[in-house]
Image (cartoon, grey):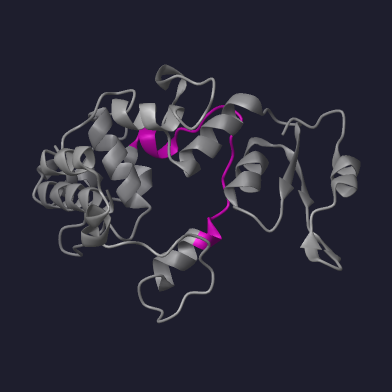
C-alpha cells in the first residue's frame, strides 16, 4: 500500500512539475477558481517539504496564493499549532540511525508481505489498479473492517485516516466554550484541534504507582465539568 501511494505521488509530481497551472500559479488572481482536485494537491504540497522536489520549478506557491483554499477556515476554527511530532519526523525520520520515539510496528518489505498473502490477496495485488476506488472506499476493505465487529455492516463503516478523522470529528462535535479532557502525553491533534476551535482543554496525565505510571480514574472524574463534551 505504501509503495502504491508513493508511486501515485511521484506520478502526480512529474505531471505537475511541467503543468503551467502550477508553474505560473503565483500570478493567478486570488478570486479565480481552480479545479477542486488541483487545489487539494496544491494546498497539500504547500505544507509538505517532501512534495516540493524542485527549486527551479516549485510545485506550488505560498498558501496565500491559493485564494479561497488558502484562507478559508471552518467557522469557529482558528490557527492550529504546528504538529511537533510530524515536524520532527520530517527532519529526522529518514536520517537518524536510531529512532526511540516510534510506537508503530517495524514495517515489512513488499516481498515479506506478499509471502504471507493468501490467494485472493495475491490476485488483487496482481490486478491492482492505481486509479480511484469507489467514493465510499474499497468495498473489500469496508467488509474486512466490519467483520471485526459483531453488529456492524460494511455500509456502516467510513474510512478516513487518523489526522483527518480527529479533525472532522471535533468540528462536528465541538463548539467554542466546550470543555475537552485529553490524555497526555498523547497525539497532539487530540488537544490542539480542540484548542483551535476555542475549547478549554484539560490534560489527564498518568501518575506514578508501584506498578509504574498509570492513569487514575478518580483524577479523570475530577476533571469533568458540566461543559465537558469529549
* Residue 140 painted magenta: no
- Residue drawn at (31%, 35%), measured in percent from left and top? 30
**Magenta region, residue range:** 67-85
Q: Position of residue 157 (x, y in %)?
A: 45, 25
Q: Is residue 217 above or below residue 224?
A: below
Which corner quadrant of the image does residue 3 belong to? bottom left
Q: Would residue 138 be visible to someone looking at this image?
A: no
Which corner quadrant of the image does residue 34 belong to? top left
Judge from the rendering whether residue 125 lies leftward or rightward of residue 179; answer left or right.
left
- Residue drawn at (60%, 33%), measured in percent from left and top? 170
Q: Is residue 160 above or below residue 109?
A: above
- The quarter of the image holding the C terminus is top right
> Which is nearer the eye, 92 or 28?
92
Q: Main secondary structure of the magenta part?
A: loop
> Which is nearer the eye, 159 or 152?
152
* Residue 75 painted magenta: yes
> Which is nearer the eye, 79 or 31?
79
Amino acid at each position: 500500500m505504501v509503495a502504491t501511494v508513493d508511486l501515485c505521488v511521484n506520478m502526480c509530481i512529474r505531471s505537475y512539475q511541467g503543468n503551467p497551472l502550477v508553474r505560473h500559479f503565483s500570478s493567478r488572481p486570488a478570486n479565480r477558481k481552480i479545479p477542486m482536485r488541483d487545489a487539494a494537491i496544491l494546498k497539500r504540497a504547500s505544507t509538505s517539504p517532501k512534495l516540493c522536489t524542485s527549486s527551479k520549478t516549485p510545485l506550488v506557491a505560498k498558501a496565500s496564493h491559493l485564494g479561497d483554499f488558502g484562507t478559508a477556515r471552518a467557522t469557529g476554527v482558528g490557527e492550529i499549532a504546528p504538529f511537533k511530532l510530524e515536524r520532527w519526523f520530517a527532519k529526522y525520520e529518514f536520517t537518524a540511525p536510531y529512532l526511540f520515539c516510534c510506537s508503530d510496528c517495524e514495517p515489512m518489505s513488499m516481498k515479506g508481505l506478499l509471502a504471507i498473502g493468501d490467494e485472493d490477496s495475491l490476485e488483487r495485488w496482481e490486478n491492482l489498479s492505481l486509479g480511484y476506488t469507489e467514493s465510499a472506499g474499497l468495498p473489500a476493505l469496508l467488509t474486512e473492517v466490519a467483520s471485526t465487529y459483531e453488529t456492524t455492516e460494511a455500509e456502516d463503516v467510513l474510512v478516513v485516516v487518523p489526522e483527518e478523522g480527529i479533525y472532522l470529528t471535533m468540528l462536528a462535535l465541538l463548539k467554542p466554550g466546550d470543555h475537552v479532557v485529553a490524555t497526555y502525553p498523547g497525539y497532539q491533534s487530540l488537544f490542539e484541534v480542540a484548542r483551535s476551535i476555542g475549547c478549554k482543554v484539560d490534560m489527564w496525565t498518568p501518575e506514578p504507582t508501584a506498578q509504574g505510571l498509570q492513569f487514575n480514574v478518580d483524577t479523570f472524574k475530577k476533571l469533568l465539568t458540566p461543559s465537558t463534551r469529549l
